[in-house]
Amino acid sequence: MAKIQQTFVCQSCGAVYNRWRGRCEACNGWNTIQEEVASAGPQSGPAATRPSRARGRVFPLEGLTGEAKEAPRTASGINELDRVTGGGFVRGSVILLGGDPGIGKSTLLMQASAAMAKSGERVAYISGEEAVGQVRLRAERLGLAKYPVELAAQTNVEDIVETLSQGHPPALTIIDSIQTMWTETVESAPGTVTQVRSSAQALIRFAKTTGTAVILVGHVTKDGQIAGPRVVEHMVDAVASFEGDQGHHFRILRAVKNRFGPTDEIGVFEMTDAGLAEVPNPSALFLAGRDHAAPGTAVFAGMEGTRPLLVEIQALVAPSSLGMPRRAVVGWDPNRLSMVLAVLEAHGGIRLGGHDVYLNVAGGLRISEPAADLAVAAALVSSLSGAALPSDSVFFGELGLSGAVRPVSQAPARLKEALKLGFGKAVTPQGRGEAGDRALPTDALRHIADLVAGIASGAPRRGGGRPKAVRYEEEM
């Protein structure tokens, strides 16, 4: 008779303990440890599916030289999705897709399923959270009900694998979501760490043996991380995050991990009444409706993978009545903002210790590259001085702690994108031999003081007085 073992597993990080604890020592999470009962007999777990043998078999070893073939891919029919995956779905690959509830994950996958089914591929959509009728209503609302997508509402992994193995294997299988799946080899409730890990392992084995591309939809926690054990992210071939703000109609599909393609590409979508629409030129969409004459706004020429992207940086600097001024950031790293404020005060002569600072990246986009330092600094100085920046200028460059403006990569691509959208000048660091590749005139800066002096000299004069930026710099 199989022996029953009781273990306590953290539902956040997957750490295993032999007794219950209030706090997990691995992730410091409180009340995340739950009891899970697993059978330790010879017929339990994945080992039951493998024949036992006393010794392993010898396999051949190969060298590094030889013909290397690119993995075969199947186009999804959605260009932005193919950009993120690296050109389409690789046969036998497994993708973990995460995102906030209601962000549009099911809508995106339904559109991709219909596009592949339209091209003649067999596609299966397995829903563990919604009934078949609910999925059909979504397909009718999107105008996709006529496409031959195979649909089922099932949560048992063994039944799913056995059903999909009948006949020709599907080119794409969507599991929505992995937290609702359960396998008979584990005696735990669906959604627990053990069930999620075992169910994912069974589906990955099915994908590798049949050549079916599998997409696993994952829930996210309050801090934006994919729920469940982190080992699942290591087991799959790619991890993608579907981001966006409920208050904006933009959606960003970002690759976090990809064994068959780049990890810094993004796909931009717009949520409409007819579903998610691709945005081939996201720069024009992010800059639409901006106020050219408003102080505190700067256009940042950034890069997301191989795609140049122009976005508006908005800053508001206001006198504070609090003992500790507020620092609020949306779409950027708060620690990076603190560094830029310190550099402006130490090397730019700008006193911001008694002011509240608010920073926002327009459109709901999140920026992570340090090349946005110069644009953020320009927006802060512009808001403090009340001088609007030139509407035809873009900014990019990294700030050092010494106040030096450091060069960034892929400057020609950023300048070419700015020129295509009608900008006439760029404020950049002094490049390293890229002057011949520049597509539009540039103002090369060496130090943050050059930026402050440039904005001060162009500040509007009120009543014949000095520019307001110069008055701030001298009085503080």
Image (tube, rainbow, N blue to C red):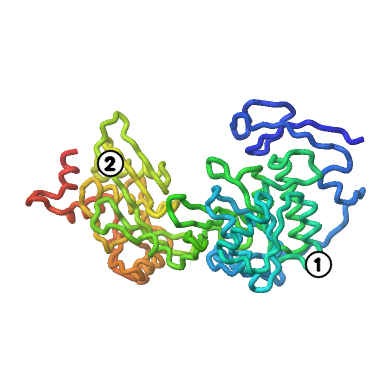
* Location of mark 2 (residue): 345
Residue 40 is situated, as x and y percent measured from the top left of the image, at 84, 37
Q: Earlier in the sequence, mark 2 or mark 1?
A: 1
Of badges 2 and 1, nearer the viewer stands 1
Mark 2 closeness class: few <14, some 14–19, many ≥20 residues within 10 Å: some
Q: Is residue 10 above or below residue 220?
A: above
Q: Which quarter of the rendered picture does the C terminus lie within?
A: top left
Kindly identify the residue that appears in the image at 83 percent across and 37 percent down.
Answer: 39
Residue 408 is left or right of residue 215, and the answer is left
Residue 432 is left or right of residue 452, and the answer is right
Cα–Cα gap, marks 2 and 1 = 69 Å
Kindly identify the residue that appears in the image at 12 percent across and 52 percent down.
Answer: 461
Confirm whether residue 104 shows in the render.
Answer: yes
Secondary structure under badge 1? loop
Q: Is residue 290 above or below residue 118?
A: above
Marker disc for residue 469:
none
* Location of mark 1 (residue): 167
Kindly identify the residue that appears in the image at 60 percent across and 60 percent down.
Answer: 109
